[in-house]
Image: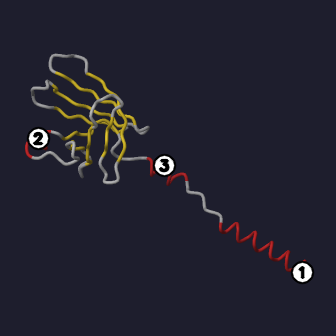
Amino acid sequence: MILFFCTLFFIFSCKSRRLAEPLETPKVLIEEKLEDPFLGVYVMDLPSSRSGITSYSVEFKADQTARILLFKEGRTEPEISYGKWLIAKDGIIILYFEQSVPSEFFIKNADGSLSFLNAQRKPYSGKMGELLILRKIKKD
């Protein structure tokens, strides 16, 4: 009799363990989490200024790297920099560099464009805010 109850106990405990095992997360859900619609190439054209920069372009890649191209007046080749990006909890995209270059901050707009933010992670106001918008030209 004891052997019978022990056998039943082990059978039901094995079944309950199977039910208690965590379910595997479907691969599709994981891929959807990693994909972000802001990835791609963005460009911003600037009027002539003291800095001489005429165009700024950034490419955000899925491996969390970024490539920045600065086009300057009188030059045919852009200055190229490489950085890494991450998204803060508040949705701000942080572009940072290994050299002693200050980080850059962006926020995604409702139309899919990105706006530059200042060092305090706040939007620029007025005419400056209108100029510092990057338009998406290519999806990654």
Above or below, 5 against 135 in this view is below
Quadrant hosting residue 4:
bottom right
Which residue reaches farthest bottom? 1
Name the amino acid type tagged 1: Ile
Above or below, 15 against 133 in this view is below
Q: Position of residue 111 (x, y in %)?
A: 23, 49
Mark 1 to mark 2 CA distance (whole Å)? 83 Å
The image quadrant where one finds the N terminus is: bottom right
Residue on which disc 1 sits:
2
- Residue in the picture at 33% in, 28% down: 99
Element marked by disc 3: helix
Q: Which of the two discs, 1 and 2, sits closer to the camera?
A: 1
Element marked by disc 1: helix
Marks 1 and 2 close (CB-CB < 8 Å): no
Element marked by disc 2: helix
Quadrant hosting residue 45:
top left
Crowd band around label 3 with a 10 angstrom C-alpha radius: few (<14), some (14–19), many (20+): few
Residue on which disc 2 sits:
128
- Residue in the picture at 33% in, 30% down: 67
Marker count (numbered): 3
- Residue in the picture at 34% in, 38% down: 40
Question: Which of marks 1 and 3 precedes in the sequence?
Answer: 1
Name the amino acid type tagged 3: Glu
Question: Which of marks 3 and 2 precedes in the sequence?
Answer: 3
Near-viewer residue (139 or 52):
52
Name the amino acid type tagged 2: Met
Residue on which disc 3 sits:
31
Crowd band around label 2 with a 10 angstrom C-alpha radius: few (<14), some (14–19), many (20+): few
Mark 3 to mark 1 CA distance (whole Å)? 51 Å
Q: Position of residue 127 (x, y in %)?
A: 8, 42
Q: Position of residue 49 (x, y in %)?
A: 9, 28
Mark 2 to mark 3 CA distance (whole Å)? 37 Å
